[in-house]
Image (tube, coloured by chain):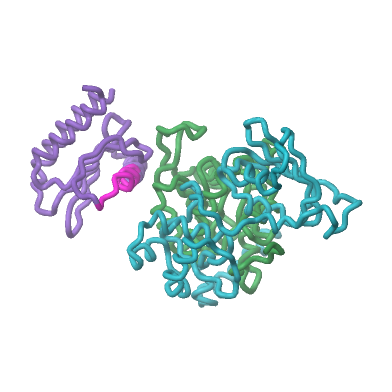
Chain colours: A green, B cyan, C purple
Amino acid sequence: MSATQGKTIKVVVSGPVGAGKTTFIRTLSDIPVVNTDERASEAIGKSHTTVALDFGQITLGDYCVHLFGTPGQSRFDFMWELLSEGAFGLLLLLPSDHPQSFAHARTILEHITSRHALPFVVATTRGDLTSKAWQPEEVADYFDLPTAQVIAINAEQRDSAQSALIRLVEVLETPGPDERPIPRKNHE
Amino acid sequence: MAIFGDLADFSFREIISVIGKRNGMLIIDDRRGKRLRLQITREHLTRLTLEQPIRQGELIQKLLQTACDNAGTFYFKAGPADAAETPPVHGSLALSSLLEPAHATAPPATVLPHADTRFILIPSRVVTLDRGLKVFLDHAQGLLEKGCSANQLAQALHMNVEHVRGYLHRLREVKKVWPVRAHQEHGDSPQLTEQRSLARRLIGLFRQ
Amino acid sequence: MNKQEQLQATLNQLNQSIPSLKGSLLSTLDGIPITHAISDPLVDPNRVAAMAATAIGVGRRISETLKTGSMKELNLLADDGRIFIYLIAAKACLALIASSDSNVGLINLEATDASNTLANILL
């Protein structure tokens, strides 16, 4: 199954609740975004949460990038996989000021990438809101990734949001495997 | 620079792993009055400060139980290497010597891997495991060599899937198993080649 | 009876009136189970609740986009069963899992009644 149909490319946007996935897609989309937000019955720091998907679209030259945002909670994990089907790549959004969500973000990332051969980039958000936030190279160390695969963005700002897409494309452009079974670490 | 969080979400091993080769001060606060400051220089603990008097004869290992127990926060402040110390120095301690083999307490459910995420054994990696974990690995080894998930292991070994997730998490912490990346299994497929050439065309558009 | 007990009683009653019903579940619109009457221990209520919310979420968007007004109900017909999902008072959803030989007319009648009862309890 091809990740491109003619000139359409599909990118999945996932990550823990509150990372800014819906915001990110709204910022980038050329068309009004299709949301499936419902009232949150839990205290998650906001009034609504995605229960199925967000859909947006951005045109790049001759190419149409379809952005599919997933829900963040584990109970919707069937959507992570469903939406990743046939995707060109994955953007994992991460709130850099909420390290309590990092372990869950890692679960999402590993769940998706162990089933779909997707190149991915981790985009850290909310770093513009506070200085008490993890930096991209620190997040890269947490995930055992090369620093090039982690980028800090402002999900509300178009150029910044677009830089995550650019980084994803750059990661794919680099030939050769971008991940190893054991990352280069000096400990033990 | 800000490496920080709650000890309920990160193990001491993970914290040390993220700090990596950075020099600076790791502050551990148990929110019950005790605060530990660890001066870290070139992957060594060069100075340790406790803001609460300790009873005579307590070993450093006991102090660091504050770090291993899940109730408290940590904050790492990067700073210059302690100029006077060049490791290994008399009076300093290699951080790696403080890391225990994968311990017996259960990690919180939020950090456990997904039951369908597949893991593969890293055969070359030598690790020390406690007895329970070693027994599990002996039984699971064959399946893990090919790559399998907690659900698959639970079925094959007639075990509770939550226990299996816990074991896989602990094995992952010591890097004896690692999540399988789908494209490592499928190699350079025609799709991947097509995607790479597409990527090159897109890069051109972005750079205009 | 408190609200929880009333809701449970309504679902139990529903299960009793429809013999082919394998289970019923009431969940929030963001996928958290409120109460359920599912006899099969292999069916995870958390999973059903999340999927019902996802289905309703998608259904609502489709109905809005195609201008068919406010969505009320979704039916899923499969080889080995049927699933009905009803929107309750715009704040919850009721999912019914039935066998393939169910009497759809009866289910619709009973479900409508149950929906009204549940809506009144929740309001």
Left or right side of C24 for A142 = right
**Vertical comparison of B141 with B106: above or below:** below
**Vertical comparison of A153 with A7: above or below:** above
> Looking at the rendering, in which quadrant would you find the N terminus of chain A?
bottom left
> Looking at the rendering, in which quadrant would you find the C terminus of chain A?
bottom right
Can residue C39 be seen?
Answer: yes
| Number of marks | 0
**Vertical comparison of A145 with C109: above or below:** below
Q: Which residues are magenta?
A: C42-53
Kindly indicate the quadrant of the structure image that contains residue B44: bottom right
Can residue A159 be seen?
Answer: no
Kindly indicate the quadrant of the structure image that contains residue B33: top right
Q: Residue A101 in the image: x percent, y percent?
A: 55, 44
Q: Residue C58 in the image: x percent, y percent?
A: 35, 45
Q: Residue at x 64, y 44 (%)?
A: B67
Viewer-nearest residue: A33 or A95:
A95
Q: Residue at x 69, y 38 (%)?
A: A132
